[in-house]
């Protein structure tokens, strides 16, 4: 086993990894930027090193500084967590060069699966279903037109080196193609340093379902069933659950076998996730493979009893999987809500600041992964994820109701959070019925929350009346103290607003 592990990350995921290492009796090294000096993960580790200023490129994305700390501290392995350098093949290659074990797949595998067009080609050759589209980056606009005409609209333009919903555009007609292509290339270039894109058929209102896999260095691999990740906003997951209400035993077996085909096709080792889109006829198609630990890994851990981070460390250390597919069982259901420092009433703008008070949820069946505490600062420099609230129940309805109880118990002041929005989703009748897809938030929540023309007019008129009453009070004051103030101006303003309706 390793002598010491450096965690090249921050926040709740750094704490999660440190805890797993402590249970394996492995000392840990934390790294932190200037704004993170007082972060919880810094105190949890046995050692901690400053690696730079707030800008991620000068700290958490600075490979030279992280490798330097690893060497100075005598670290023989690095766990990248998720985000930052977790799927950076260059970072994995540098670890390999320096004789430091990267806790994840090889740099070669990360590079292959990180390029979406290469990954599509590999999956097609392995017999994993893929959506109609291109397996090469597209160079010219004319080529896009030909492909779109061949597979039919709607299509999706996607960044070849992308992820996280960036560099993606849905195109419904030929008229939109040019502007969408330009926007996708621009966003891909700024986000990933690579403006190349590819095209695939766009499935309307599919399910987003992923399969968790584990594989060792000796060719042994297993899957840990599926996670339903269809509740998304702007292509970002906000609620995940397992099992999926759309997956029966037959489909689960097919998807599990396809995921293991994907693993074997690239000699994958460590934890990974194979993501699929599933249509209404239960046809499924390869979307991408995440060559890292997923944010939502906790719900799989709760229902299987398998510590995925612990398995990652054991596999990286060269140990064989002691799991076989027939021994992996699922117990009950689990659901995760991601709590963000965002303002749902203001178009989900980030809400950085200091947490004044914090009451965390607890009780039977509750897991609470966080880095937040009273008095801590939620920085504008990083992802606004505050915590992951995970609950377990014997069935979906018990799990859903327990999640609602936990969200009601959860209280944070000093910043805005997405807790009220999550409660609205959990209480939605379509969510309760399990009738969900990737368009759920837009169609069932945001659209239903939009005021009708009549409601909007009433709201505006109410605001105008209140404004007029206030102006009237002010005019009485001005009459007493400034008799020269004209009342016609106030009357004129009232008439101007009234004429609009």
Image (tube, rainbow, N blue to C red):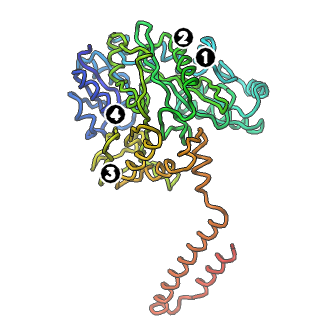
State which tag comes first along the sequence, 3 or 1: 1
- How many angstroms separate mark 2 from mark 1 (CA)? 10 Å
Q: Quadrant of residue 214?
A: top left
Contact between marks 3 and 2 (CB within 8 A): the answer is no
- How many angstroms separate mark 3 from mark 1 (CA)? 47 Å
Residue 265's label in the rendered image is 2
Q: Residue at x 67, y 64 (%)?
A: 453
The reply, left or right, for residue 75 in relation to residue 240 is left
Q: Nearer the viewer, mark 3 or mark 1?
A: 1
Residue 230 rendering spot, x and y as whole percentages: 55, 37
State which tag comes first along the sequence, 4 or 1: 4
Contact between marks 4 and 3 (CB within 8 A): the answer is no
Q: Which residue is mark 3?
A: 354
- How many angstroms separate mark 3 from mark 2 (CA)? 47 Å
Q: Badge 2: few (under 14), some or many (20 or more) residues near its Cα, within 10 Å? A: some
Residue 418 rendering spot, x and y as whole percentages: 45, 49
Contact between marks 2 and 1 (CB within 8 A): the answer is yes
Residue 128's label in the rendered image is 1
Q: Residue at x 61, y 87 (%)?
A: 488
Q: Which residue is mark 4?
A: 10
Q: Residue at x 61, y 79 (%)?
A: 493
- Secondary structure under tag 2 reads helix
State which tag comes first along the sequence, 3 or 2: 2
Q: Nearer the viewer, mark 4 or mark 1?
A: 1
- How many angstroms separate mark 4 from mark 1 (CA)? 35 Å
State which tag comes first along the sequence, 4 or 2: 4
Q: Quadrant of residue 51?
A: top left
């Amino acid at each position: 086993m390793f002598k010491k592990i450096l965690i090249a990350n921050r926040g709740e995921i750094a704490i999660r990894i440190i805890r797993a290492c402590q249970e394996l009796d492995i000392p840990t090294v934390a790294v932190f930027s200037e704004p993170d000096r007082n972060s919880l993960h810094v105190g949890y580790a046995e050692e901690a090193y400053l690696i730079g200023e707030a800008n991620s490129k000068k700290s958490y994305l600075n490979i030279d500084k992280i490798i330097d700390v690893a060497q100075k501290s005598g670290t023989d392995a690095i766990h990248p967590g998720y985000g930052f350098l977790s799927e950076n093949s260059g970072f994995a290659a540098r670890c390999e060069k320096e004789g430091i074990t990267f806790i994840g797949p090889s740099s070669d595998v990360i590079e292959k699966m990180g390029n979406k067009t290469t990954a599509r080609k590999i999956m097609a050759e392995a017999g994993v279903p893929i959506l109609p589209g291109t397996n090469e980056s597209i160079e010219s606009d004319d080529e896009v037109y030909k492909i779109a005409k061949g597979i039919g609209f709607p299509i999706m333009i996607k960044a070849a080196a992308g992820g996280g919903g960036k560099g993606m555009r849905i195109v419904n007609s030929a008229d939109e193609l040019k502007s969408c292509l330009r926007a996708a290339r621009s966003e891909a270039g700024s986000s990933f340093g690579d403006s190349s894109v590819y095209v695939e058929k766009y499935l309307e209102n599919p399910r987003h379902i992923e399969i968790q896999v584990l594989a060792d260095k000796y060719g042994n691999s297993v899957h840990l069933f599926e996670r339903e990740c269809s509740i998304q906003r702007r292509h970002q997951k906000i609620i995940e659950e397992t099992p999926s209400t759309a997956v029966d035993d037959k489909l689960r077996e097919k998807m599990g076998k396809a995921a293991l085909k994907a693993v074997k096709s690239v000699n994958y080792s460590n934890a990974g996730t194979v993501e699929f889109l599933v249509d209404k006829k239960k046809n499924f198609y390869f979307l991408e493979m995440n060559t890292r630990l997923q944010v939502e890994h906790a719900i799989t851990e709760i229902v299987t009893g398998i510590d995925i981070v612990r398995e990652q460390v054991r596999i990286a250390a060269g140990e064989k999987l002691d799991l076989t597919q027939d021994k992996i069982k699922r117990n009950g259901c689990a659901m995760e809500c991601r709590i963000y420092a965002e303002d749902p009433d203001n178009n989900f703008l980030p809400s950085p600041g200091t947490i004044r008070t914090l009451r965390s949820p607890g009780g039977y069946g509750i897991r609470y992964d966080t880095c937040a505490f009273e008095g801590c600062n939620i920085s504008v420099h990083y992802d606004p994820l505050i915590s992951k609230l995970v609950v377990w129940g014997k069935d979906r309805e018990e799990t859903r109701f327990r999640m609602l109880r936990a969200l009601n118990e959860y209280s944070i002041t000093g910043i805005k959070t997405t807790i009220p929005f999550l409660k609205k989703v959990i209480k939605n009748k379509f969510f309760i019925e399990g009738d969900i897809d990737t368009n759920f938030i837009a169609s069932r929540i945001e659209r239903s929350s939009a005021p009708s023309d009549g409601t909007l007019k009433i709201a505006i008129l109410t605001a105008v009346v209140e404004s007029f009453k206030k102006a009237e009070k002010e005019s009485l004051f001005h009459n007493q103290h400034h008799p020269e103030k004209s009342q016609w101006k106030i009357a004129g303003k009232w008439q101007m607003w009234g004429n609009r309706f």
